[in-house]
C-alpha cells in the first residue's frame, strides 16, 4: 500500500542519516572547553577580542549541551553570557554551577545574565529579546558578539499541544522562535561588526535530520501553521488523529518528519543570513552537534530506546555535543567565505 511504501522510504532515509553515528567515536571526541582552549591557543587575537564581550546562548540547563557551550564562552573566553531557558530554577542552577566552577578554578567570577524564554510563545521570546537588548544597550554599547540558537525540541508521538500562536510545536520551537530572536538581536550583531577584528557570529544548532525534511514551503506554513509547513497536509506522513475529546495526536512518522522539516527551515534561514549579512559582516553557520546521549530522543519511545542502546558506546556526552557549536562560534576559519555550514 501507499502507506507502507512511504514509511519504507522514511526508514531508508533514517538509516542513511544514522551512518555518521556509526563513525563518530566518543572516547576521543573533544569537550566543549577543550575545543575552546585549542582554538584560543592557536588564535590569540580571537581570545583578546572576546574578553568582556557579550554572548547569548539559548536552551541552557545544568549539564546540557547549552550549559557546556555557555561554560566554554564564560570560563575560557571571559565573555559575558546571557543564559536563556524556560525554567527559572534550571537557569538559576546553571548560573550557580558556572560561578562555583570559576571559584574552584580560581578564575574571576563570570558575568552571567539569566533570561527566561519560552520557545512555545513568540510573545515570550520577544520579551526576552527586549530584556537582552536593554542590557546590551546599557552595558555593552549595544553590541552582541555571539548568538547560539541551541534550544530545540522534538515533539513526537504525543498529544499535540500547539504553540501559543497556534503553530505546530516542532516548527514553532525549532524555527519560528529562533527566527524571531535572531531578527530582533541582529542589529546588535551588526553593530559589533568591525569593532574587534573577529566578526560577530550566529550559530544555529540544527540536526543531520534536516536532510529528511525537504519539500516544505513558506506558503504551506502560512496557510496551515498547525501542519508546520509540510507540503502534504493530509498524507500518511503527517496524518493526524482526533481523539474523542477533540484533541489531535500526530502519528510517530509524522512527528519525525515535522521535526526534520523544522530543522531544514532552520538551516535555510541560516544560509539566507550568511548570504545577506555581508556589510556589515555577520557570520552565520548551522551545525549538527553529533548524536548525543540525552533525553532528547526518548519521546520516540521504543525506537528511541533501541537507537540509544544500539549506539550507546558511540554517543557523545552533552559536553562533547557542545564542542561543535563552540567550534562554530570561535574558530576564525568558520564562515570566513560567507557560507553556512
Image: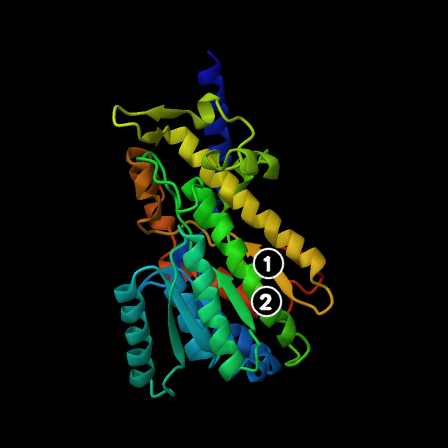
Q: Quadrant of residue 223?
A: top right
Q: Residue at 38% of width from left, 41% of height from top? A: 162
Placement of 196 over or under 219, stated as above or below: below
Q: Secondary structure at mark 1?
A: strand
Residue 285: image location, x then y, percent: 59, 58
Q: Nearer the viewer, residue 241 or 198?
A: 241
Residue 10: image location, x then y, percent: 48, 28
Q: Secondary structure at mark 2?
A: strand
Q: Residue at 50% of width from left, 66% of height from top? A: 326
Residue matched to label 1 = 285
Residue matched to label 2 = 201
Placement of 218 over or under 56, stated as above or below: above
Asked if residue 326 shows in the view, the reply is yes
Q: Residue at 30% of width from left, 35% of height from top? A: 159
Residue 335: image location, x then y, percent: 65, 62
* The C terminus sits in image quarter: bottom right
Asked if residue 150 shows in the view, the reply is no
Q: Residue at 38% of width from left, 88% of height from top? A: 108
Query: Are circles 1 and 2 on residues that touch, CB within 8 Å?
Result: yes
Q: Nearer the viewer, residue 262 or 100?
A: 262
Amino acid at each position: 500500500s501507499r502507506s507502507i511504501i512511504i514509511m519504507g522510504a522514511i526508514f531508508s532515509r533514517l538509516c542513511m542519516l544514522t551512518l555518521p553515528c556509526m563513525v563518530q567515536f566518543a572516547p576521543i571526541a573533544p569537550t566543549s572547553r577543550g575545543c575552546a582552549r585549542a582554538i584560543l591557543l592557536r588564535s590569540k587575537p580571537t581570545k583578546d577580542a572576546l574578553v568582556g564581550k557579550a554572548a547569548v546562548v539559548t536552551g541552557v540547563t545544568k549539564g546540557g549541551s547549552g550549559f557546556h557551550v555557555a561554560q566554554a564562552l564564560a570560563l575560557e573566553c571571559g565573555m559575558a553570557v546571557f543564559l536563556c531557558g524556560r525554567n527559572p530554577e534550571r537557569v538559576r542552577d546553571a548560573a550557580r554551577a558556572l560561578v562555583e566552577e570559576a571559584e574552584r578554578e580560581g578564575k574571576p567570577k563570570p558575568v552571567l545574565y539569566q533570561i527566561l524564554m519560552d520557545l512555545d510563545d513568540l510573545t515570550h521570546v520577544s520579551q526576552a529579546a527586549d530584556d537582552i537588548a536593554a542590557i546590551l544597550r546599557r552595558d555593552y554599547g549595544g553590541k552582541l558578539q555571539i548568538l547560539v540558537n541551541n534550544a530545540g525540541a522534538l515533539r513526537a508521538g504525543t498529544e499535540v499541544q500547539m504553540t501559543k500562536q497556534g503553530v505546530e510545536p516542532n516548527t514553532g520551537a525549532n524555527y519560528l522562535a529562533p527566527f524571531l530572536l535572531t531578527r530582533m538581536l541582529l542589529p546588535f550583531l551588526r553593530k559589533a561588526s568591525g569593532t574587534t577584528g573577529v566578526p560577530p557570529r550566529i550559530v544555529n544548532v540544527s540536526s543531520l535530520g534536516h536532510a529528511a525534511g525537504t519539500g516544505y514551503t513558506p506558503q504551506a506554513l502560512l496557510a496551515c501553521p498547525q501542519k508546520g509547513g509540510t507540503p502534504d497536509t493530509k498524507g500518511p506522513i503527517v496524518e493526524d488523529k482526533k481523539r474523542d475529546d477533540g484533541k489531535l495526536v500526530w502519528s510517530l512518522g509524522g512527528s519525525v518528519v515535522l521535526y526534520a522539516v523544522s530543522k531544514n527551515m532552520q538551516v535555510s534561514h541560516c544560509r539566507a543570513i550568511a548570504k545577506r549579512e555581508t556589510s556589515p559582516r555577520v557570520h552565520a553557520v548551522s551545525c549538527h552537534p553529533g548524536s548525543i546521549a540525552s533525553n532528547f530522543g526518548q519521546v520516540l519511545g521504543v525506537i528511541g530506546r533501541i537507537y540509544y542502546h544500539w549506539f550507546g558506546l558511540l554517543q557523545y556526552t552533552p559536553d562533547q555535543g557542545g564542542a561543535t557549536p563552540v567550534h562554530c562560534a570561535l574558530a576564525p576559519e568558520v564562515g570566513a567565505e560567507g557560507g553556512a555550514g
